[in-house]
Amino acid sequence: MKRILIAVSVLSSALFASAQSGTNSPYSQFGLGTLAEQNSGFNRGMNGLGIGFREHNQVNFTNPASYSAIDSLTFIFDVGMSGQLTNFKEGGKKLNAKTANFEYAVAGFRAARNVGVSFGILPFTNVGYNYSTTEFIDQTKTSSYTNTYTGSGGIRQAYLGFGWQPFKGVAFGANGGYLWGGYDRSMVNTFNSESTANTLSKYYTASVRNYKLDVGVQFTARISPKDQLTLGATYGYGHKIGGEPSCQVISTNKQTSVADTTSYPLHGKMDLEIPTTYGVGIGLNHNNSLKIGLDYQLQQWGSVKMPEYNTTNGVVDYSLSSNLLKDRHKFTLGFDLCPVENSRKFLNRVHYRAGVSYATPYIIINGQDGPKEMSASLGFGIPIMNRNSLSTLNISAQWVRNDSKLFVTENVFRINVGLTFNERWFMKWKVE
C-alpha cells in the first residue's frame, strides 16, 4: 500500500508536468492536435508495438488484457520523458527546433490470482506551434500584411485499468480514463505602416473534461515446446467529449484603434469528438528470448466532425464540418530480443528492440491529405538489479518523418528515456 501511495503522489506531481506541449509542429493546428504515443518505455523501443504482447515485468498499456500477466510478487512503476529535434523543410527552406516533454507515468500490480491492475497518465494529443507568413498586397510591394499563427495545449488522460485471465489462454481487460485539456489557437493579422486596412484576428479555444473507455482481449496458445502465439484485439469507444469550441473574431480599425469583437457560435454549443478505434495484433514468443509482433490500428476520424470558420458570399459561419478529418491506418512491425533473461552475463540480460511503422494522415488541409508518417526506432532495456529490485532502464531512439509534397515535411529525431521500477512484494528471504 505504501508503494501505491508513493506512485499516486508521483502521478499527481506529473499532472503539472504533463501540461506542457510535446510538439512544435504546425500540423498540430489541425484536428485535436498531433496524436501522442499511447505506450510506455518498452513499447517505444519497438516503435509502439504491443497489442499481442504479454509482459510479466512491464506495463503494456497498449492492450489492457496484458495486465493479467503481471508477476504476482511485484509492483511496477514506469515513468518516461523524451527530447526531440525537429527539422522542417518547405520550398527549399529549412528550420530546426528542439523540445522536451514529460511522456507518461504508469503503474501496475497483481491484485488477485490472474487479475492485474494498472493506473497512470499519458498524453492523448499535443498542440504547440508558432510561425508567421507575410504577403504583399499589390505589385508595388509597398503594402504588406503578416499573419502570425500560434497554438498551445493538448489533451491528457488519466486511467485505471484491469486485466483478467478467467482461464488459461484467454484474457480480457479494460481501461477507464478521464480526458482533460484543450487548446488555445490564434491567427493574428497585422499590416505594415503603409496600409490603412483593418486588421482581422481570430482566437480559437476549447476545454475538454470527459471520459475515455478502451477494452482488449488476448488469446494465447502454445504451438511448440518453446513457442507461444498470442492474438490480441483492442477497441476504443468513440464519442462526443464536449469542449464547447468557440471562435472570437476581432476586427480593428487601424486609424481609430476601435475594435469590433464577434463571438461564435452564435447559437447553441458544439462538441468535440474522439474516434472509434480498432486494433489487432499478433505476437510470437520464442523461449521467452525472442518476441516478434505485428500490429494494425484503425482510427475512424473520418466520421468525426470538427469546427470550421467559413465565409461564403459574405456570410460568416463557425460550425461543425465533416470534411476536415479522415480515417487513420497504422501498421507496426517490431521485435524484442533478450538472449537469456536470468543469465549471469550482463549483455545476455539486456533487451534489444527495434520497430518500424507506417501511418496514413488523419487531417485534411485545404482539401488535400495531410502528411503520411513513416517511423523507425531502436531501443535497449538495460537491467538494474539489487536485492529487492529488478528494475529496467528503457532507452530508445526514434526517427519520424511526416512527408508531404504539398506542405511542410518534418523529420523528427527523438530520444525516449523510461525507468521501470519493479519492486518485489511480500518476498520472504531465507537465511542459511
Image (tube, rainbow, N blue to C red):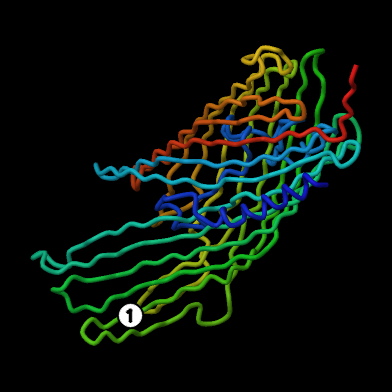
Position of 91 compared to 247: left or right?
left
Q: How many numbered marks appear?
A: 1
Q: Is residue 382 above or below residue 315?
A: above
**Residue placed most toward the observer, 56 or 132:** 56
Residue drawn at (59%, 52%) of the image: 124
| Element carrying mark 1 | strand
Relative vertical location of residue 136 with respect to residue 42 in this rendering, above or below: below
Residue at point 27%, 59% (across, down): 133
Quarter of the figure that contains the C terminus: top right
Q: Amino acid at mark 1?
A: Ser
Name the residue that disc number 1 marks: 251
Q: Nearer the viewer, residue 23 or 430?
A: 430
Point 71% across, 55% down: residue: 177
Instruction: Tell me residue 246's x, y (percent).
Output: 50, 73
Residue in front for this viewpoint, 239 or 396: 396
Q: Give the class, few, some or many, for how many residues have Cα within 10 Å of label 1's Cα (few <14, many ≥20).
A: some
Residue 265 in the image, given as x and y percentages of width and height: 51, 78
Could you tell me residue 233's position as x and y percent? 73, 38
